[in-house]
Image: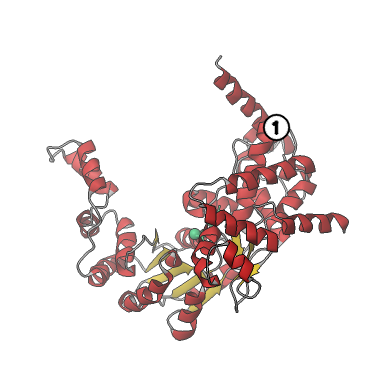
Amino acid sequence: MSDGDKIWDELDNIYDQWGIKEIPFSESASTIGQAKIKEVFTGRTKELREVLNLFRGRERKRLLIYGWIGIGKTAFILEILGILQRKTKNTITAYISLPQGMDLATAALIALAREMEDDEWAKQQLNQMGLPTKKALRNRKVKGKANFSLAGVEVQEEVVAIQKPQFPSLSFEGLLQRALKKSDQVVIAIDDLDKQDPARVRQLLLDAQGILKSGASFIFTGHPSGITRDILIAERGLFDLALKLEAMDVDTIYEMLVKYLNSARPKKFLQRFIPWFSNAKKFQVALDDPQAVAPFTPETARLLCERSGGVPRWLNRLGSYVLLKAAKLDADIITPEILQQGFAYADEQVRGQSGLTPQDFIILELVLEKGILSDANVTIDDLQRMKVNTFSEILPILDKLVQQDLLRRLPSDRTAEYAATPLLLSPSNEDDNEEKEAD
Ligand SMILES: Nc1ncnc2c1ncn2[C@@H]1O[C@H](COP(=O)(O)OP(=O)(O)OP(=O)(O)O)[C@@H](O)[C@H]1O
Ligand SMILES: [Mg+2]
């Protein structure tokens, strides 16, 4: 057996001991698929109630879901779409993450066309934009009419740049009418509105008046940056509901952790808890069972949840780093010491991510030293150290560090205040832990 094979088997052993098949955490909801979302989705009951209540009516709805990075916007809208799909008989749900530089009508057109695989016109729209359609390729293969190979088709389609339709709003309207002939309701979620240049977002929405007044329902997501607030104030009436997702409480995060771990439990682990249960696949270890958080102990699970600050992405990232480190250390349970080493590993990994410049690190260190950095507390010395004249010059860098999970923006409406995320070992994060231990 090669060394590599041996390492693989050793890892198998440790995962076996932990009672999971794999590390269940993921950074982004868009990569985990609807089935898994349904399995792990936790909390947000008040928000779900509010949104689902709106969808009981037959009128079309326009919703804005906003919240900071990693708070769970994508997970939330995917859960909504999943519920609508499961519970209503005749709804078309479509999801798209808004590509850079694309207008909303084109995005809506693509999202809807992708869900209408049997509609010739929808396929044609996608083909014209050089986007693949599963059905069209299959048909060509079945008919065997085309005299080029299937692989050739795929290559050809991949290299064609997206050709925007000439009149995207009209194309969308046309397609929507075809969709509404067969379905009662069309719901289109356009995610990541604010990952665009902020100045563009407002324009995008203004330009989208046409599709927003169409018969489809829309769900948009964005960050609560200044621009989103402006839109909410200035364009009163543009949305039927604007819902802010906030950080979650520790108990909900704990429940989330259990669900993620349960989603990766092999049958034999579950059977240990309830051997007579024949369909163990559907069985979940109860929330209050200490084994529900294995390989964490209830104590370290709680410390992890507290550290995540109520932000689902930070729970996912920290959880994943801690387990990776524990596997390296061959630890069969996550003791407080192993947990600390996992946090140190997270710190090492997020600092080591690519694309960080020396200036980024200078700014990061400054934030770590000061605890909080804002226009109000920055000194002339600080500015000199960062090699800028004004605080506003570093705003783009601060926002980039936020995108990379190194910094977070504090929820203050007046000024932009930045602090380290719990992925970093910072003096302020240490204080937190000590205070809690002292309590
Ligand atoms: N309510 C929830 N229940 C379970 N997992 C969640 C929940 N909300 C978010 N998550 C998980 O947390 C991670 C981050 O969530 P998500 O990708 O939805 O954040 P986001 O707000 O869309 O982030 P971004 O601002 O980067 O788009 C994902 O792995 C997601 O599955
Ligand atoms: Mg998202």
**Residue 289 visible from this viewpoint:** no
Q: List the single residue furthest toward the right.
A: 438
Is residue 169 rendered to the left or right of residue 31? left
Q: Position of residue 275 (x, y in %)?
A: 71, 35
Q: Quadrant of residue 248?
A: bottom right
Towards the viewer: 76 or 91: 76
User: Residue at 59% across / 52% down in the picture?
Assistant: 40
**Mark 1: which amino acid?**
Leu
Q: Quadrant of residue 127?
A: bottom left
Q: How is the image coloured?
A: secondary structure
Quadrant position of the N terminus in the picture:
top right
Is residue 81 rendered to the left or right of residue 159? right
Quadrant position of the C terminus in the picture:
bottom right
Characterize the local packing of mark 1: few (<14), some (14-19) or many (20 or more) Cα atoms within 10 angstroms. Answer: few
The residue where tag 1 is placed is: 329
User: Residue at 56% across / 45% down in the picture?
Assistant: 352
User: Residue at 57% across / 18% down in the picture?
Assistant: 3
Q: Position of residue 193 (x, y in %)?
A: 43, 67
Please count the marks in the image: 1
Relative height, residue 333 to residue 399 (above, below): above
Towards the viewer: 219 or 82: 219
Q: Quadrant of residue 17?
A: top right
Q: Position of residue 64 (x, y in %)?
A: 48, 72
Q: Position of residue 168 (x, y in %)?
A: 25, 68
Q: Of helix, strand and loop, which one carries label 1?
A: helix
**Residue 88 visible from this viewpoint:** yes
Relative height, residue 243 to residue 115 (above, below): below
User: Residue at 67% across / 50% down in the picture?
Assistant: 257
Residue at disc 1, CB closer than 8 Å to ligand 1: no
